[in-house]
Amino acid sequence: MSSFTNDAVTTPTYTDLGMDSTGARLLQSPDGKVIKAYEWHRTQLTMDLVVTDTSTGSIALIKRGAEPFKDSFALPGGFADLVKGEDIDETVLREAQEEINFMGGTVTRATFRANAHRDPRGYTATCVYTINVTSREGFKAGDDAAALFWIPINVLMELTQETAKTFAPFSNNNVCGFAFDHLDILQEVLSRNVPV
């Protein structure tokens, strides 16, 4: 059994099932689902989105509906469709529409992260974007987002990976802390005064 960790996140333990014919490592999640994890040389490009409701000072978070990190909070986002030649700026608009029903607006690049321990499926690089909204109207969970929540910025800045597991809005909704390194990303973006 393998466990992937970084300073802020310990992922669930996955059973290594070996390699498939495409070179992907097959991992079985705790709930029995098999996912593909590519070797580190196959970097996957992702994007994450920090959506701020400026009228309430809160951030949109999704509850993940799929492994890895099922039932954990995450920033809306996902993988760039490199097979179709999707640009990362196109990815942010597509994923925002699919996951939280965001239909357009100005997004700003905020930061970039890449390392071998962000995601148990393999080496991922993420481009983080920010966007401000003045209303939550029309926002809803979709695609692989099981739910959408708006959490006050001041509360998010005080959380740690451990305290997030018992934070009332999370624990009352069967949420298991934060996925990936999303709490670190969120706190970095907010503390650097990146325009949100």
Image (cartoon, rainbow, N blue to C red):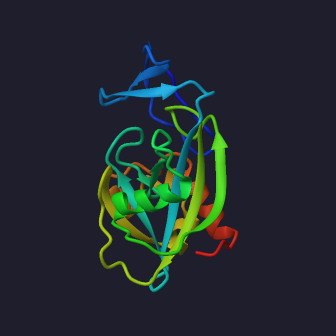
Residue 129 at x, y = what percent? 57, 63
Q: Toward the viewer: 119 or 80?
A: 80
In which image quadrant can residue 125 be found?
A: top right
Count all numbered tags in the image, as a single digit: 0
Q: In this rendering, is residue 35 above or below 84?
A: above
Q: Residue at x 47, y 38 (%)?
A: 83
Residue 107 at x, y = what percent? 54, 70
- In the rendered structure, the answer to whether residue 6 lies left or right of residue 70 reads right
Q: In this rendering, is residue 178 above or below 40?
A: below
Q: In this rendering, is residue 61 above or below 64?
A: below
Residue 139 at x, y = what percent? 33, 71
Q: In this rendering, is residue 130 above or below 31?
A: below
Q: Toward the viewer: 121 or 151?
A: 121
Q: Residue at x 36, y 58 (%)?
A: 99
Residue 132 at x, y = what percent? 51, 77
Q: Residue at x 62, y 64 (%)?
A: 109
Which of the image's four quarters has the C terminus?
Answer: bottom right
